[in-house]
Image: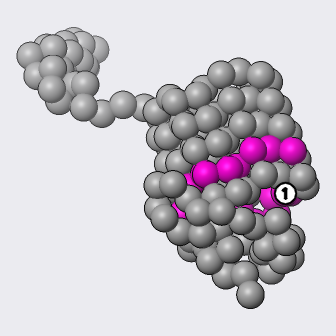
Amino acid sequence: MYLQQGIALLLGVMIWCVASPALATDWTHPLSFSNAELGRHDFSGQSLQAAEFSNANLEMVNFAGADLRGAVLSASVMTQANLHGADLTNAMVNEVKLNGADLSDAVLLEALLLRSVFTDVNIAGADFSDAILDRAQIKELCQKASGVNSKTGVTTRESLGCR
């Protein structure tokens, strides 16, 4: 009896979803690439809002112009990744190895960047406004900060609070 009621309820929900396509398609699951091997993958220009890339190998990945707002990239390896012009607003980029990465003209508004490594990165025109960084990271990034972000009009030095 309970099985029949459960099946009837499930069929009712399925019919409701088919009859209400707008409700069924407006909600989507965020993409998950956690623990994935994505070296050299091309995500350029893609909408990847709230996608999860935690603990992933993202070496030499192309995220140029990608929409990564709210994405989770925590504890990933992004050596020589191309993030030119990417929008990383509210992204979690903590504990990420960004050695040799291109962050030029990227938007990192309110991004969490604690304990990430920025060795030999290009940050010309990147906007770090209200990003969460520690003092050592800010000091390191200020030494190479230059340019103005093409989308926000904010200078990299100003966004980092460089003196």
Main SS of the magenta segment? Answer: loop
Q: Name the side, left or right, on which 150 lies relative to 27.
A: right
For residue 43, above or below residue 79: above
Q: Residue at x 54, y 36 (%)?
A: 66
Rendering coords of residue 138 (x, y %): 78, 74
- Residue 110 visible in the picture: no
Residue beneath disc 1: 118
Asked whether 114 or 100 is in front, the reply is 100
Residue 47, horizontal then vertical, whole percent: 46, 33
Look at label 1 and name its amino acid: Phe
Q: Is residue 59 above or below residue 130?
A: above
Mark 1 burial class by Cα count in 10 Å: few <14, some 14-19, many 20+: many
Residue 60 falls within the magenta-colored stretch: no
Seen from the viewer's position, the closer of residues 47 and 162 is 162
Please state, as top left, top right, bottom left or bottom right, where the N terminus lies in the image: top left
Which of 152 and 134 lies nearest the eye of the viewer?
152
Residue occupying the far bottom of the picture: 163
Is residue 159 visible in the rendered structure shown here?
yes
Residue 82: which quarter of the image? top right
Q: Can you tell which quarter of the image residue 14 is in?
A: top left
Residue 111 in the magenta stretch? The answer is yes
Q: Which residues are magenta?
A: 100-118
Provide the secondary structure element on which disc 1 rests.
loop
- Residue at the spot 66% in from the left edge and 62% down from the top edge: 147
**Residue 132, image x, y percentages:** 66, 71
